[in-house]
Image (spheres, rainbow, N blue to C red):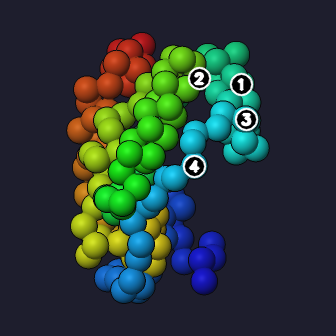
Amino acid sequence: HYSISKMNINGDVLFNKGMKKKRLTPIRLVRPFNPDTFVMKKIDGFLMWCAKNDVSVVISWPGTLPFARNARQSTERFIKDLMKHFSGQRIEILGNPEDFFVKRHQIYDSIYHLNQGGTSYRTERVIKLMENSLTFSQWRTM
């Protein structure tokens, strides 16, 4: 149901108004963070390429529902370990996951797909955090 014909020139999906899916389960990160997974190895490879090519990287959290309460401890441990992993590579992370939590009415069809209202909210958060970002301010003054 997602296709290039439904995107603008920026890659933004244009049809995500309202809420398509009514029942969504908040995120539960119950497995420990593992830097040796395929995805993390790909991300780390990209970050190494960026470092070699003088590309600054700033990471932000996805806009999503608040984390599930019944997995709070394991989720907090995962996030802490993930942040430690990236900060060890000198990658700036904008804010905390809570800065990007959205309300249910800002979700479109999955816990990671925001509708237009959610996208606007998240964009405002990113701009505010970027204005205080050391990486961004250094780049902007170059």
- The answer to whether residue 52 is left or right of residue 116 is right
Is disc 4 surrounded by few (<14), some (14 to 19) or many (20+) residues within 10 Å? few
In this view of the protein, which residue sits in the foreground, 69 or 27? 69
**Amino acid carrying mark 4 in the image:** Arg
Sooner in the amino-acid sequence: mark 1 or mark 3: 3
Give the quarter of the image for residue 99: top left
Tags 1 and 2 touching, CB below 8 Å: yes
Tags 2 and 4 touching, CB below 8 Å: no
Q: Is residue 96 above or below residue 110?
A: above
Q: Which residue is mark 4?
A: 31
Describe the element under mark 1 as helix, strand or loop. Answer: helix
**Amino acid carrying mark 1 in the image:** Trp
Can you tell which of label 1 and label 3 is closer to the viewer?
3
Sooner in the amino-acid sequence: mark 1 or mark 4: 4
Tags 1 and 4 touching, CB below 8 Å: no
Q: Is residue 100 above or below residue 90?
A: below
Q: Which residue is mark 1?
A: 49
**Amino acid carrying mark 3 in the image:** Asp
Percent position of residue 131, x then y:
26, 30
Describe the element under mark 3 as helix, strand or loop. Answer: loop
Q: CA distance from mark 1 to mark 4?
A: 28 Å
What residue sits 59% from the left and 23% below the top? 55
Q: Which residue is mark 3?
A: 36
Can you tell which of label 2 and label 3 is closer to the viewer?
3
Q: Which mark is residue 55?
A: 2
Percent position of residue 110, x then y:
47, 73
Q: CA distance from mark 3 to mark 4?
A: 13 Å
What residue sits 50% from the left and 31% below the top? 81
Describe the element under mark 4 as helix, strand or loop. Answer: loop
Q: CA distance from mark 2 to mark 4?
A: 31 Å
In this view of the protein, which residue sits in the foreground, 66 or 74? 74
What residue sits 32% from the left and 82% below the top? 18
